[in-house]
Image (spheres, helix red, strand yellow):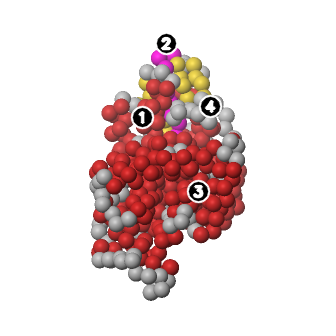
């Protein structure tokens, strides 16, 4: 979970802080910076402690996901745990202005606690008063720190650094966006894929939870540059960066989508279709093409609903055999995430076989995972053979 911070930071290790010195000797800003350095030193000392990692992993599912995926509720969380503890200001992802918003939300939630739109706010308040307090008590049985502040802010650091991995998994589970070999893509490449997938959907590309979950996904894949320090994971700042970049690139993204639409031929699935025609298809078009392909092979086919397809685009059935099919019209190799999705989708739709069809190729990891899960792979070569056999030889 915290493997990015296993290397010791010698500068932090050498810092010794005496908080008993009076504020007249140091400014508030200096005291806060020194305390931040102390907390990061304490964090580095325990970031690979297996017992603590287990505790954090077990508490995450007990926290309302909205605390991490809605900016306002995350700010509320930081306001609640830092209320009255100005010394920890620099450890928060929230700015001073953010915390004022958090205070206003807290006051509304406590005044109108029964309001339906404040349900998540009340969940966050309940978490801080209950499980967060219990976790501090549990930490005291494992680690000895100087004061109550230390437990609060070390625990905050642990949650801040655990959230990206956890929320990245939630993002992929909820939205199933295929980035292909994401390690080879730039932040802008990923942002374009994100925008293209969400622009016409029921979710706002600029709004939560989408943009927050996407931010965490980019953080965990290190798309904001090298991880030089803990500040890299400042979710609040990174979220703002993504929104600004999205605003700046929106017009260009729309043009790229328009240009592709104008250059793409309108396809009729009929005799004479070639693999080059397939390359020009969009995602939905390709799914219908694959369904038509299996229909010509004698299968009864159904294209699934896109909102909740569970990784299955087409279901083909013949002689009591149901096949779950995922269709990937890509310009890059299909990754092993497609294999994971179709394997899960087979169970959901009670299918006996699973096939992933693409006009591209598959990564080595995808091929290995398909073999161990008995998933059949149709790559570009096989698809072209099927097209030639079915559309050129079938009357």
Q: Is residue 371 above or below residue 15?
A: above
Tell me the quarter of the image containing the C terminus. top right
Residue 144 drawn in magenta: no
Residue 327 drawn in magenta: yes
Pick whichever of labels 4 and 2 is earlier in the sequence. Answer: 4
Residue 276 appears in the rendering: no
Q: Which residue is mark 3?
A: 76
| Residue 250 falls left or right of residue 76 | right
Q: Which residue is mark 4?
A: 305
**Residue 190 x %, y %:** 54, 56
Q: Is residue 123 above or below residue 28?
A: above
Q: Which residues are magenta?
A: 318-331
Label 2 to label 1: alpha-carbon separation: 22 Å
Q: Are marks 3 and 4 in contact (CB under 8 Å)?
A: no
Where is residue 250, by image quadrant?
bottom right
Which structural element holds mark 4? loop
**Depth check, front residue: 282 or 189:** 189
Closer to the observer: label 3 or label 1? 3
Q: Which residue is mark 1?
A: 377
Label 2 to label 3: alpha-carbon separation: 57 Å
Crowd class of label 2 (few under 14; some 14 to 19; many from 20; radius 10 Å): few
Residue at image position (35%, 38%) is 369
Q: Are marks 2 and 3 in contact (CB under 8 Å)?
A: no
Which structural element holds mark 1? strand
Residue at image position (40%, 50%) is 135
Pick whichever of labels 4 and 1 is earlier in the sequence. Answer: 4
Q: Which residue is mark 2?
A: 319
């Amino acid at each position: 979970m915290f493997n990015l911070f296993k290397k010791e930071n010698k500068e932090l290790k050498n810092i010794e802080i005496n908080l008993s010195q009076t504020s007249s000797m140091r400014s508030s800003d200096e005291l806060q910076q020194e305390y931040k350095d102390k907390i990061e030193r304490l964090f580095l000392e325990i970031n690979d402690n297996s017992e603590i990692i287990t505790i954090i992993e077990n508490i995450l599912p007990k926290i309302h996901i909205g605390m991490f995926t809605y900016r306002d509720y995350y700010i509320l969380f930081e306001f609640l745990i830092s209320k009255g503890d100005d010394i920890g200001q620099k450890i928060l992802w929230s700015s001073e202005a953010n915390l004022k918003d958090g205070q206003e939300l807290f006051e509304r939630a406590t005044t109108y606690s029964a309001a339906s739109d404040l349900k998540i706010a009340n969940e966050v308040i309940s978490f801080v008063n209950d499980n967060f307090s219990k976790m501090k008590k549990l930490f005291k049985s494992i680690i000895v720190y100087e004061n109550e502040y230390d437990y609060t802010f070390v625990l905050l650091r642990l949650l801040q650094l655990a959230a990206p991995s956890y929320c990245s998994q939630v993002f992929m589970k909820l939205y199933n966006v295929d980035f292909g070999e994401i390690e080879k893509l730039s932040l802008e490449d990923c942002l374009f894929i994100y925008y293209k997938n969400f622009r016409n959907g029921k979710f706002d590309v600029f709004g939560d939870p989408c943009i927050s979950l996407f931010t965490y996904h980019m953080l965990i894949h290190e798309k904001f540059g090298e991880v030089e320090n803990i500040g890299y994971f400042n979710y609040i700042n990174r979220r703002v960066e993504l929104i600004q970049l999205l605003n700046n690139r929106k017009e260009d993204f729309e043009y790229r989508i328009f240009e592709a639409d104008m250059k793409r031929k309108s396809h009729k699935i009929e005799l004479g279709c070639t693999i080059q025609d397939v390359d020009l298809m969009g995602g939905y078009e390709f799914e219908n093409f694959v369904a038509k392909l299996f229909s010509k092979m004698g299968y009864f086919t159904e294209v699934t609903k896109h909102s909740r397809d569970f990784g299955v685009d087409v279901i083909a059935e013949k002689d009591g055999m149901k096949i779950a099919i995922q269709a990937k019209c890509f310009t890059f190799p299909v990754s092993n995430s497609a294999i994971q999705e179709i394997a899960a989708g087979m169970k959901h739709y009670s299918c006996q076989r699973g096939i992933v069809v693409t006009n591209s190729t598959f990564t080595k990891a995808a091929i290995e995972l398909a073999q161990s899960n008995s998933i059949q792979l149709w790559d570009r070569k096989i698809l072209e053979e099927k097209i030639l056999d079915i559309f050129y030889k079938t009357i």
